[in-house]
Image: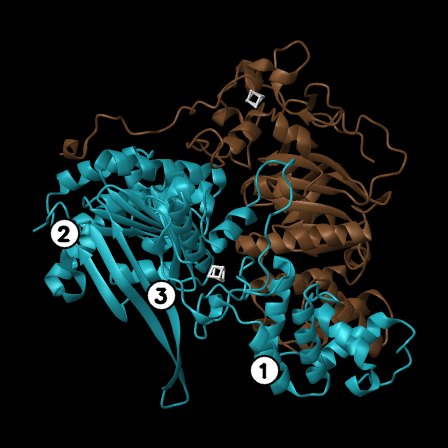
Amino acid sequence: MSTRDDTTDVRDVPTERDDQPLLKISNLHTYFRTDSEDVRAVDGVSLTVDPGETVAIVGESGSGKTVASEAITRLFKSPPGYIPEGSIEINGREITDLSDEELRRVRGGEVSHVFQNPQGALNPVYTIGWQIREALQLHADVSKSEARERAVELLTQVGIPEASSRLDDYPHEFSGGMKQRVLIAIALACEPDLLIADEPTTALDVTIQAQILELLAELQEQRDMGMLFITHDLGVVAEIADRVAVMYAGKIMEKGSVEDVFETPAHPYTRALLDCLPGRGGIGGIPGELPDPRSPPPGCRFADRCRHAIDACRTGDQPGMHRVGDAPDHTTSCVHFEPGRDSSTVLDAGSEPAGSPSPPDDLERGGRR
Amino acid sequence: MSRSDEPLLRVDGLKKHYPITEGILNTEVGRARAVDGISLELERGETFGIVGESGCGKSTAAASMVRLEEPTDGEIRFEGENVLEYDAAELRRFRREVQLIFQDPDSSFDPRMSVGDAVAEPLVVQGMSDRERRREIVADLLERVGLSAADMKRYPHEFSGGQKQRIGLARALTVNPKLLVADEPVSALDVSVQAEILRLIDEFQRELGLTVLIISHDLGVVRQVCDRVAVMYLGEFVEVGPTEELFSNPQHPYTRALLSAIPTPDPTDRGLGVELTGDVPDPSDPPSGCKFHTRCPEVIPPSGIDLSQETWRSVLTFRKQVERESIDVESIVEMGVLESGDKYGNLEEPSPDAIDDADLKRWIRSEYDVPDRLDDPRAEATVDDALDAIVDGDHDRAKAHLAEEFTTVCEREKPELEACGTEQEAACHLLDDVHVELDELRLTE
Ligand code: SF4
Ligand code: SF4
């Protein structure tokens, strides 16, 4: 693996695990060329997923979470996208230098994807059965009747009632939730070790989301599959993940077990994000905008919006990943957690509304001339 | 003329049906009942939310209330005036007093128009010719929504989604509306931005005494800003009440299911409560009685049947399938054969005839999560008879058996909204019982 990791994750996985991780991303960068400077969508991310484990990457738009997940099997459009630096290992094998053909085999083999929009991911002109058989035959040499049997089995496993009678139906004959089930069946067809699910429930209603989350958790347990779950929704993270990485502007701000991160959120961004949730402190949001991904400012990417920012935040690189308390795996990229500084500045701060562009109180309607 | 004791907006029995037509003659073959009789009163200065899943009719309801869609039936009164009888001039005034913002702020901007012009547009339409005055109002509003007067010269594409929604809000407020209708105003935005927009709406509501109607699929959003909430399912309100009461003490099983489906940001509290099975039924063919009875986890069993709620739910779902003649025995056989391993492993063409009746009956039960043996002997006998009939291919007999034993008040009678708390109302037969019990309690006290 790459050891050029200079700014982030110096303490990644401090406890040695005997078995190697299923997925190991080290210092991953993913840039997109433009007419001017490159857009640095992912800018030094390190992360592991163990077999049978669910790791969530949570972030808002512009965080780079989707690009990070697509970079694993190089799903992004290239050019303009490229990986200038970093390493990705699946089951111990480096895959950043594989040819397109070899990567395609990784995608239909060890790794599968499920995406947000079930409408777009299914081909409207083919039956569901045909699409699942395609996925099966791509992966293994199976006869048509075997493929049909497997397709029925898969659809049943993902909770499609009377599966065999639905094989000849077209995508439009399925509801949104059912389509997502079909896509999960297709993703499972190759018996992946790692399922990468990018906002798989975001387009669905909450009651359907609940069904799909439960299904994913169940399937994962049955198959001891690793899952990388990309989401903007902290509630979903708390529901499904074992570990979580919070991303902002191309970098990981905080990571750790879900218990640790939700119990003791450390990074000011994580804390602010949690405060945005209903019933959690305040109504207010996080004023300000993301930094320009073409020329991010020096220091911490969150500095412009951070109420705890000090001078040290605006120089050098993104702060290293520092331990939070005694939890072995819980780390955050914030100067206040550097050895020798007092992290209680952040941890003990209440959730008073941050400086915000609120209108002055005395401006009454009539005050407008 | 406005009477202050009148609610700002009063809606009574509002319906919006869309004809479903077929053929070149456009013969009406059915009606999608998008909104099917809702009533509400918006008090001045309150924020009212309508929440529900996609397809429940909430957006159509809002559009019909402000006559973006012509209602099929019902009455709408704005400050006491009959909105459906407005002439063109009155309608123009109404359109000014009621402003809308939508999920996608782009839809309300002309990309070639500067932000300043876009925000000033309603003033121009209103006939304000004083340029300088328009400029002042626009500058003031932009600042109030957290932007700056200098942004007037910029164009919509230069702004983020959240900023565009702020501009949309500024524009809606230029003409001093009395009512702001916001249809999914934040659902396309990041949470950190959502919170800001909601705070702005909240502030304007308080400072300007604005009345706000928010349509959202997101209970969290509604909880954050609304004073009162209506929960909508298949074109109807199933529960209405003050936000806190409704969230802390939901009375309708659908509200309870919705609330329990929201993932909490607490990893120690996992599991998403009651799970609703199946999808929302087709609004052109809604279920009889209580429209939620096909999915309701608390659907009421007929008296004399002693089954666990879960089993009863499965039995009822099974009965409904039999009624719709959509038990697909062939498909069940195919799956059963696959899972049976050796017993039927060498069957070439699995067909129901080649399967033992006992096996087939077991497979059908398992397809519908009906236990192999029901605890209640009478119910068990009925299910068994029905299964025999299905195996014999006699669906009518199966239907008759099941219908005789397993009908519920929930499918026979439509529950009406009734009071169940100081200001809370819900439409559910479970509450009928509560009332009876309460009365009895009072009598025995
Ligand atoms: S490093 Fe500084 S700017 Fe960044 S999160 Fe910590 S306090 Fe805020
Ligand atoms: S009336 Fe019956 S089906 Fe409808 S919500 Fe109440 S219990 Fe459920």
Which residue lies under the disc numbered 1? B400
Q: Chain of mark 2?
A: B
Q: Chain of mark 1?
A: B
Badge 3 amino acid? Val
Q: CA distance from mark 3 to mark 1?
A: 33 Å
Q: Which mark is residue B126?
A: 2
Q: In the image, residue B156 lies at what x, y percent?
A: 36, 47
Q: In the image, residue B250 lies at what x, y percent?
A: 45, 47
Q: Given this view, does label 3 or label 1 mark the residue nearer the observer? A: 1
Which residue lies under the disc numbered 3? B35
Quadrant location, the C terminus of chain A: top left
Q: Residue furthest left?
A: B1
Identify the residue shown where x is 87% and y is 70%. Answer: A141
Q: In the image, residue B98 lies at what x, y percent?
A: 22, 52
Decide if residue B229 is in sight here. no
Q: In this rendering, would A216 be left or right of B54?
A: right
Q: Colour of chain A?
A: brown
Q: Judge the density around disc 1: few (<14), some (14-19), many (≥20) Cα neighbours within 10 Å.
A: some
Q: In this rendering, would A214 be left or right of B352?
A: left
- Sequence-earlier tag: 3 or 2: 3
Q: In the image, are marks 3 and 2 on the same chain?
A: yes
- Sequence-earlier tag: 3 or 1: 3
Q: Which mark is residue B94?
A: none
Q: Chain of mark 3?
A: B
Identify the residue shown where x is 80% and y is 45%. Answer: A52
Badge 1 amino acid? Ala
